[in-house]
Image (tube, coloured by chain):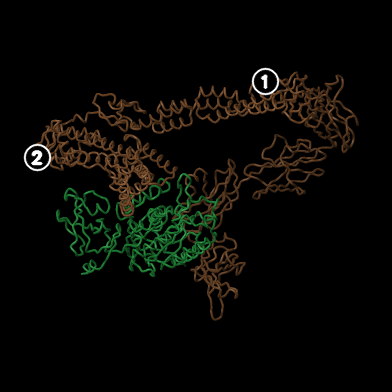
Chain colours: A green, B brown
Amino acid sequence: MIATLKARLQTEICPYCFEAFKLRDTPFRCASPPGRCTPEPDEVRAKAWEDRVPMGRVMGADGRFREHTRCSACSQVTHKRLCPHCHMELPHTVGKFPHFIFAVVGAKEAGKSHYLAVLIDQVRRELGPSLEMLLEPLNDHTIKRYRDDFHRPLFQERKVITSTVSALTDRRVQMPLVYTLTFSGRDLLGRKRIRSVVTLVFFDTAGEDLDDEDTIAMVNKYIYHSHGIILLLDPLQLPRVRADLEGRVALPRVNTETADILTRMTRLVLAGRKLPANAMISAPLAVAFSKFDAVEALVDPQLQLNAAADHRTGFDVADFDAVNAEMQALLARWDSQVLVHQVRTHYRRFGFFGLSALGCNPHGDQQVPRVLPRRVEDPFLWLLHEHRLIPTRKRG
Amino acid sequence: MAERPNYYELLEMDPSLDDWAAIQARILEKQRAWSKAKTTGNPRERRTADRNLSLLRDIETVLSQPQGRRDEAADAVRRRQQARQAAMAEVDEAIAVFRSGGGTCTDAQFNALARRFAGTLPEAELEQRLRAQGVGRTFAAAPGDGQPRKAKERIGDETASAVRRNLQHLGVATLYHFLELAPQSSPAALRDRATAIYQENQRRGKTDDESSARNELAGLCQKLFADAAGKERYDNFLAVEAMDALKPNIEIAGGDGFITQQELDALVRQGRQRGVSAEDARGYVEEYAARRRWGVQRDAQLAAEALRQCGPCGTLASPGARNCAQCGRPLEVECPRCGAPTPTQNAACERCGAHVGDAPLVQALLREGERLAGEGRLAEALERFGRALHYWPGWAPAAAAREAAGVRQQAREAALWPVEELVRARRLCEAERELERFTRAYGAGGVEALALAARDGRARAQAAYERGQQEAGRGHLDAALEAYEAALALCADLEPARLAMAAHPPPPPTALAVRAVAGGFHLAWKAAPSTRPLSYRVVRKTGAAPAGPDDGDALPETAGLTASDAAPEGVPVWYAVYAARGGVLSAHAAQGGPHLRTAEVRALEAVAGDGEVVLRWRRPAGCRRVEVWRRRGAPPAKAGEGELQVATGQELHHAGLGNGEGWGYRVVAVYDDPAAPGRELRAAGITATAVPTAPPPAVMDLRCTREGSTVHLAWTPVPGAAVQVRQAGQLPAFTPGQVIAADDAGRFGRLVASGGGGAAQAALNGQGRTFFVPLSVAAGTATLGRAAEVTTLDPVAGLTARRTGGGIALTWEWPAGVDEVVVAYAHDRYPAAPDDRCATRATVSRARYDAVRGWELRGAERRRHYFSVFSRAPGVEQHAPAAHALESMGEEVAVRYRVKTRWLRKDAWLELEGAGAATVDLPPLVLVARPGAVPIDPGDGETLATLPGLRLEAGRATIPVPPRFHGTGQYVKLFFIDPTAAREIRLLPAEKEQLRLS
């Protein structure tokens, strides 16, 4: 009964193609080895992902919610649930636990890939154990992509990550990194238990895919489906900051898209969610200024922005309040008050952050001998906190 | 650059059409179609339409002219014939398959063939050609067997589509054609070429459709040829494309349901001619046959498989052939690494894996380099050889060519330098001769500008000379001389001009007067009588009078009537002054001499001793003897005053004197007068004074204390003597107690200013050792004391501590000259010294630091960490003062604050709250307010209050806000006056709205 209701009522979003579907409409794929059940071409998957490798037979949905089904050819039970739109295998948590899509958005060379690489590393190594949350990749694609595109260059080869390829030229980029975040704890009797599991979807976008509204709408549907957006901005693109730092630090090339990216993204979310022009966006928006180490000279050493955050026992709201106010004040000083105004006008929940993924300016040879992240976890934890997934830190 | 399309073909018109009005109508029609496609078509159509629209003006220009139309129509006909020839070649290939299958063709096969060549070959002609080749028409069909092979990995459809679209736009067949490199080339060579194309496009800065296509293809090449696997995927894609083109022939071969060995052989041969490997071609045909359920005759080896192939041109050759029948190139090349003979169709050597496929590129680079070297363009040649060696490292011919070119370039530079010097000296005739010799030896490359300058200058000089000749012919001597001078100014070695000038030498100057002055002689003479401007050359000779203008040392030529000369001391010299006009000197000179320049004794010092004075000096060259004139009190004013004492050596002892009685001395050097034998010349003499006295005792207890860059010096004062302290980085050898003249103290460094009373202060610059030497000075005598030494060492700068999960990372900037530091930390205070027993210590070398850009303490406890970092002097157990950093690991004291107001009482204050109920003492604070936003530093707004300190009793305290700020809506923020206090105590403001004075 509950299953039928769930199948009829619950709408899910595919974490790969970001199309909505109902659980009752999900087909299954035969999980038998090729020797037992002959693989066959999957036209839907081939069309969606250009993946023409023959794979397990697809059993269509019959309009009823099922936990599993039997292959019509080999009669084996299969639990491989597929997205009806793209035939990608859905996480086993679909329908059982909530899942959250967090989008990392930013102009070209804002440092999105570095941010994502360091954030995932930080959450897995540092924050996870202290907050009793475990971040695990959900599929082989995520393991391989994170290892090859993010972790290996930055943490093993110790060099900068090269520019992300446009999703228009490499479909692989359109496939997000999908993780499960498992929160553990103890029950009233003190026994260990898993409190909840959520699915997290991170999407690293090539900067140029955000330069054009049509492209945003075509390849970045995830933005308006997301449950939280981390908008990365490069403070070295702000004219006033550039003028103040001229001759003191190496400045990147001017990217005129930086100023427009928030406008484009907001329009996309309003249109994608079919919101009227006078509606405010409810998804929390974290406006994070990356490469903050480069503007250290312009920031008073007493500001909370310069202190190390301590989220080991929960999200430090007091620290967030101080950083949020300081960042807004800094933007006012840097003649970018309009940015704050834009965010305040369109977004119901927002926060401003300053962070540095690498903690240093890569040398001329593009080497990163040591990664010293600063406050890189703040926006992510704030999003989790906004969704009530982690507790608030109690100050003694 | 892609060839432009034929306009008849582009407009889809018959070449016989020559009516301009009809053509105009067609152009208009196509223009409409292209405009529509430009806005509504797919990307490919849009790009094509865009290109076609850009050609419109040229189309109209070409086709509006009758001759242009005729040429274009002829070109269209030629292109059609070429297409027809290509179609006929394909037909012949199909016929070869029919013949290999028994010489029969079914109706279905014939119809398929007719459809394939529709438009280029009429059906009747096709049938006729088949008959002529002995192929008849019949029927047949039968199923076969076969297992499909595993497909090789290829490039993705989207990439393939992009490649195809852009190649088609440029009118080239493959990416290898686009890169103009052989398919056997290495990925590195292909990538380099793609980069070069891209950079060339960037340099040109064009953004038209063709440049866009080239850029896109260059980018795709970078991606596809990123590695060998990527290249293989592209090659597989090309192979499948090539074999796809053979499908009609395969259909013909399998039309009867069975492919015979002969048919298979013909198909594999055709595949190989299209650049597909025999294995792939055979695999493709067999797989195709399996899909169509045809039978295939499977014999071990096909004749086509044994054929060799020419790598550069792709032509097939018999198995025993050594050279290509098409291009004549050898079918095997020697591996540049191991020397093994390798077929040119291979990309790499089978024995050692060297990229033999780059042979055409590398050999072309070598040839081009040799050509450039032959032309004398050695820098460009070296670049080509370098590139060749980049692909084939150590390849002997390129290495030898590079070495030879390098040697030649060095020789060339050496040979060119004298020519440049000649041009600079305006000796252009000689320069031209040398340049000709140079060109014969090294080629004319790179010396064009020099040759032009020489040629042009000489031509203008020649013109000036000829003008002078004309003036001379008219009897205008002055004008002629002026023209000759102009000619010589342009070309100093123009012989006719020089001879013409030599025929009219200027008269000599007169009345040379030479006067001794400080530092040498001053010469003056009377000008030679001439209406033309003259210059003068002064010649000096030692020992005798100059016999001519080249006999002696010439002083710089002058246009004036005076000169100064620092003649050598103690040697008699003679002078001669010549007049010069246009480089021609007067026949005679004004002469003077001999003259002797006297010099004083050197390094005179008067060291006073106990009842004696010792004078020391060094005799100047040519000095015959030294006279010492002495007098009590002050030195004599000139030689001849006081008592004379003649010294032949370089020292004089004046003993038997009373202590405290001063003596003055004048030491005069005496010379023989060269102008008057038997007479003497005297220098003016130099003076010294001394008071015989007992030398003061030496300072043996100089002590140094360093504070930053300041050194405090202290010693026991010496009665009756002043103590000087001198500071130096290095000291000359000396022994404490040694007595020297006070004037000689400068050798021991610069003087340290002393405040008297046995103490002084010195400033240090830079890093390293500094010596301080005390000198006790009395009556012009100094006694050296025992030196003290200080090593200066700066602390590290910009020390920061940052938490890294479970650890703490320290970063700092190294001071100059320091290669090692000691990092010490404790949990309750900053370690005071590097050997602090209560601290944990680590020694960090600069190399280790640079490797990971910092130093990390792993697994740090959750306690405060007070770090002190001490720079260590190289090779000495000495450390700089500490630099400090604190990392609280989340254990810092946090004090939260917010604004509280009582609206009715119009009262406002800041409420501070610490963690727990502990008492916290805050150091001096400042409260700042500003409208609109929270202040972000102590100077960002108006100061509301400055507090000398604040105690949080039971964790709480308040700061009243002055009444005049109540209700102003400003935002407040609290800062420490000393920002370092924030390391231990965090002032944590509430959210923005709780900081507002509402």
Say which of B557 and B469 sits in front. Answer: B469
Secondary structure under tag 2 reads loop
Left or right: B204 in relation to B559: left
Q: Chain of mark 2?
A: B
How far across and down, in percent of the image, does residue B286 sit? 17, 38
Task: Name the residue that disc number 2 marks.
Answer: B142
Say which of A163 and A293 sits in front. Answer: A163
Res B210 → quadrant: top left
Q: Tally the marks.
A: 2
How far is disc 1 from disc 2 in space, using C-alphas? 107 Å
**Disc 1 to disc 2: CB gap under 8 Å:** no
Residue B908: tell me if it is visible. yes
Q: Residue at x 45, y 48 (%)?
A: A368
Do the residues marked 1 and 2 share a common chain? yes
Left or right: B134 in relation to A186: left
Dot 1 or dot 2: first in sequence order is 2
The answer to whether B745 is drawn above or below residue B43 in the figure is above
Task: Give, as a three-letter code, the residue at label 2.
Answer: Ala
The N terminus of chain A - image quarter: bottom left
Res B278 → quadrant: top left
Task: Name the residue that disc number 1 marks.
Answer: B499
Task: Give, as a three-letter code, the residue at label 1.
Answer: Leu
Q: Chain of mark 1?
A: B
Q: Residue at x 64, y 21 (%)?
A: B495
Residue B219: tell me if it is visible. no
How far across and down, in percent of the image, does residue B872 sit? 57, 45
The answer to whether A2 is drawn above or below residue A166 in the figure is below
Classify 10 Å Cα crowding around label 2: few (below 14), some (14-19), many (20 and above). few
How far across and down, in percent of the image, does residue B220 sit? 35, 44
